Image: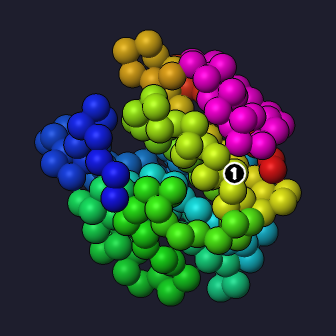
Amino acid sequence: MRVDREVPDFDRPSLMFRLEDVLKYRLLGERYYGRAVERLDLRGDEMVLDLGCGGGASSRCILRRLGDEGRLICLDTSGNLLGRARRRLAGARNVEFVGEDIRDAGLAEGSVDAVLVFHVIHDIPSRDRGPVALAIGRVMAPGGRLVVVEPTRASHGMSPEEVRHLLSEAGLTEEMSDSSGHHYVGLYRK
C-alpha cells in the first residue's frame, strides 16, 4: 500500500473528522451522497466501485440501488476507514472490501460498470493523480459510468479543469458537469 504524508492521515483522523463520518453515515448519507449515486443510473446488476469509500456512507447508498445480482467493491487505502465500512456493511452479501491503492488492487481490466469517486482525487498527491486516473479508466468496462465529486475551493480542493484533464487523459468522456457552488460534479463515460 502506498502512503504519502502529503495527504491527510485517515488512519489517525481528528475528532472533527470522526464526528463528520458518524453524521454522514447515520443522518446525512442519502442527502449527502444520494444525488451522486443517482447519477450513476444503476440498473441493479452492475459491478460498482466505490473508490475511496471511507466509512461506508456512500457505499450504503450504492447498496440500496443494487439488487442481488449487483456487486460492490469498497476500496480505500485507509485501514481505519475501511474497517468502519466493513463493520457498518457487515450484513451485505454482495460487497468486497479492498484495502489497497487502485493501482495495486488487482482489479481486472474492464471489470467495473460504474465508479463513484466522492471527495477523493484532491487528497491524492499531485504526482499520483494521473496514474490513479489511468487505473480508474483501465478497470472500467466499455460504456462504463463514473461520477466524480470534488471540492473546488483553493484552500481545499482542485479545479474542475484539472479533474477534466485527468479523466480525459484516462480515456473518459465528460457527459455532464456542474461546478456551481464549491464542488465540481461530473458524469463520465468510457
Residue at screen point 56% across, 43% down: 131
Q: Position of residue 92 (x, y in %)?
A: 47, 82
Q: Position of residue 13 (x, y in %)?
A: 19, 45
Give percent across and percent down for residue 120: 46, 41
Is 160 covered by the magenta stretch? yes
Residue at 84% in and 60% down: 142
Query: Which of 120/125 is in front?
Result: 125
* Residue occupying image coordinates x 43% and y 56%: 101
Q: Nearer the viewer, residue 64 or 166?
A: 166
Q: Which residue is mark 1?
A: 137
Residue 19 visible to the viewer? no
- What colouring method underlies this structural image? rainbow
Q: How many marks?
A: 1
Q: Residue at x 35, y 73 (%)?
A: 86
Q: Secondary structure at mark 1?
A: helix
In this picture, residue 8 sits left or right of residue 180: left
The quadrant the N terminus occupies is bottom left
Pointer 1 local density, CA inside 10 Å: few below 14, some 14–19, many at least 20: many
**Residue 93 drawn at (x, y percent):** 50, 87
Along the line of sight, the residue nearer the viewer: 61 or 75:
75
**Residue 13 lies in the magenta-colored region:** no
Instruction: Give the answer, above or below, for where 11 lies relative to 93.
Output: above
Q: Is residue 151 left or right of residue 67?
A: left
Amino acid type of the residue that numbered disc 1 sits on in the rendered structure: Gly
Taking the image as shown, residue 93 lies to the left or right of residue 166, namely: left
Q: Is residue 140 visible?
A: yes
Residue at the farthest top position? 154
Q: Which residues are magenta?
A: 159-181
**Image height of 31 relative to 87, above or below:** above
